[in-house]
Amino acid sequence: MKNYLRFLRRCLGVSLVGDWRYYAWIGALGALSVIGLNAYAKQFVAGLITTGMSDQVSWGVYIANFTFLVGIAAAAVMLVIPAYIYKNEDLHDLVIFGELLAVAAIVMCLAFVTVDLGRPDRFWHLIPGIGVFHFPGSMLSWDVLVLNGYLLLNVYICGYLLYCRYQNRKPAKVLYLPVVFTAIVWAISIHTVTAFLYVGLGGRPFWNSSIVGPRFLASAFTAGPAFVILALQVIRRATAYPASEDGPPEGGAAGSRRVVQRTAHVADLDRLVQCLPELAGVSIEERRVFLASAVVMVVPTGGILLHQGETDNDAFFVLQGRIVVKRREGAQVRITRDVGPGEQFGEVSALTGAPRAATASAEEPSEVLCVPAQALRRLMRHPRVNEIVTWRMTERLMIADHSLLILRGIVQVAMIINVFLLANEIFTEFYNTNREAISWRYLVLGLHGFHALVPWFWTSVALNLSAMVLFMLPLTRNLKWLNLACVMCIFGIWIEKGMGLVIPGFIPTPIGEMVEYVPSRNETLICIGIWAFGLLCFTILLRMAVPILQGRLSRWNERTAPARPSSP
Amino acid sequence: MPPDPNLPPSDRASAGMTRRSFLRGAAALSVGAAAIAAGLAPLRQLGKFTSVNEFLQKYYKELTPEEMKVVLARIEDEVQRQYGIRPHVRDYKPMNGVEFVYALNLTRCVGCRKCVHACVAENNQSRNPEIQYIRVLQMPNDGTFDMDKGDTNYAPKSVPQPGFFYMPVQCHHCKNPPCVKVCPVKATWQEPDGITVVDYNWCIGCRYCEAACPYFARRFNFTAPSIPTELINPNMSYLGNRPRYKGVMEKCHFCIQRTRVGRYPACVEVCPTGSRKFGNILDPNSEVSYILKNKRVLILKEELGTLPRFFYYFDI
């Protein structure tokens, strides 16, 4: 408990430190949040009359954004499912980012619902046990339960996994796997329940259609992973710094900072066992064989142990000191992991034969045990060693293009399904001259001279269709095109589920009145404020998570470096 | 600690100057706090928003008679403070063996909207912004019965206009009310005598009921209601016509303060053509029992299964 509080305090500390880009971004989001808060204070005083809503159109952009963001939150599972069910190692590295996004999205959802309430001071009427909770009758009470439950699940998963990484210990499966699988089902439920909020209203034919639930999921699994693709690239860029600032060039370092080799002794292995207790089960006989093939490398600060792009098959265990692994992408460098005594590096290339993905150098005078791939494989026949080495392989900040392309595949399929479902609905509503389809007619073509939503609808269709085509073309294997397609589909879906779903349900009214809706200025400012606040939360969560994943914010440097984060 | 040349630049920057960064952080925090305080400045105009007793008031169905007395007295004080008139607020209870039903004669209604005005006056509805429970549709006599062709803003010199018929719509007090089903805090419910009511002190203002209602019968207080003192009806009921709060729902309650003491609703009393009939369906000799047995009846949106207690009927 005390340790956890110290962990939280250090996370908080690191979130306050960054370069000027970080401060500018945080400052801008903070300023927008305060502007939104100011707008909300005005609404709180005057009432919802400050919005564009009316008795006729009684829900507006607040509920529209809420609906969209529930989808974004639910889509975190599209990272979790491939990682945990299909054992996709690339996405495994990224799961935590999806979960953090879910947390930020749910925070925004709750904020949007709160600002929509006429009497936020009476929120306690909604708390089960204290107020009067209409469960299971009201779908809104279901939504209260599933959204808060999902928030708790994700906060728990992120908090536990990051804490374990911070403590440099392997998370206990019983403590998080059941929660992860619960969260997968839960994610589907939050969006289905949100769809049922609308579907359950028999008096609103526009919503009262069983296809709305599947459409919600399809659009969520389109916009959500698209959002994650963009977020990951921002993280990737923000965690890198120009290679020119990365100390002396690599080649020149070799001469002045020599790596000295010596044979490995039993004492070296004992030191390793001390910081890697999983090795204790290895028999004396095997240890001797292992030692025979190993050498110890003594590296001064800055000494380089392996170079990115090389193909050799040695793996390394740190005996003493710190080793930083840096990956160079173009003119940018990013720290992917930072390892200390007992931890390994270079094992991925050793086991797969792939070229080195990064360069490893000593951050302080260090000693590492260098073993050939066969020796590592032999060692990994021991289940406990295998488990810890495999686990630590994923403990790195690695956002590979390959992972983004897996997500692209998900968006591709989800978008096709989404467009297909929309086409189904359009056909049903328009082929028959059914009076029930009147809101559809208003949305798509305009009705009785009212057509405020028509441009929105067609913009959304255009964005979604172009995004779908782009996602199908090999063009979007190029990241620039992929980003464009992602932005298009996020906006397309945002309109589809906001202006295109919530608002037309109210027009015309059940007794045929035509009243249109346009969000007011104050209402828009509140929305911007909530989005800014949500992104602020997401940024701060990432600011904490990234150095932990890199291994640069962890228990080993609790005392030695109170505030030494990596670049943001 | 000297900056380490091997660290990335931002690390080098932050490694050696914790004190300065602390001061900078403190400055940033105070700027942030000041900004938030400035952002919240509009709250100073809030005035007296809610009292502690009002905030902590229990759910209507959980109030004991003694607690109800205290609540009613507090509400009388609130009304007096706000409107300068001492009202008489009572909690009228349903009568045994009574289920109210409403019947409206579409052949006779001339669309004069006297019912709308009587309703507003009786039920202390906000005059600014205007809130009305009854919407009257002017519908064309063109061989259709299409509410989309209805006009609620008709304003001819006199009514009825040739070629039109008139259809007032208000709360149907359904036996299977969608609004009650969706309310997350049970702030709206059906009373034993069939009246669907709202506890204005329990509603959280989510407007889900308004989205659920197929008859456009519910109204929301988008801001604090305003009623001139001279127009206040001082005979008030807790579940009925007492002044409402900002941010809560309200709706037609069959003039609970009249009908539960044996009087007609204001709209029935005022109707100059006798199109509006109201009574106890459990009494076989009541006017409404006669109408449902002997007249041709129309139930609006019968296919939704809401089972309204509000019937339209025809003379011919």
Image (tube, grey):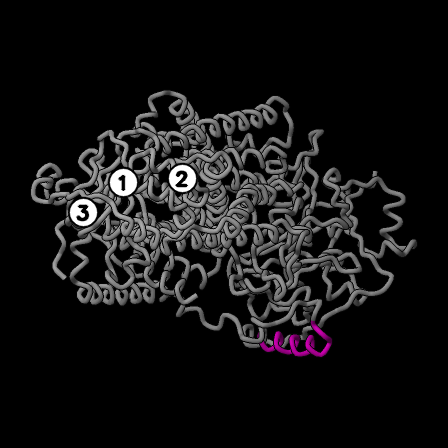
Q: Nearer the viewer, residue B269 or B17?
A: B17
Instruction: Report the residue marked by disc 2.
Output: A380
- Helix, strand or loop at mark 2: loop
- Helix, strand or loop at mark 1: loop
Which is closer to the viewer, label 2 or label 1? 1
In this view of the protein, can residue A387 be seen by the observer?
Answer: yes
Give the magenta-colored segment's residue range. B63-78
Instruction: Report the residue marked by disc 3.
Output: A298
Numbered label attached to residue A294 = 1
Magenta run includes residue B71: yes
- In whole angstroms, how far apart are the C-alphas of marks 2 and 1? 15 Å
- The amino acid type found where label 2 is placed reads Met
Same subunit, labels 2 and 3: the answer reads: yes
- The amino acid type found where label 3 is placed reads Val
Task: Please name the residue shown 68% across and 77% down the image.
Answer: B67
Task: Please name the residue shown 28% across and 39% down the image.
Answer: A292
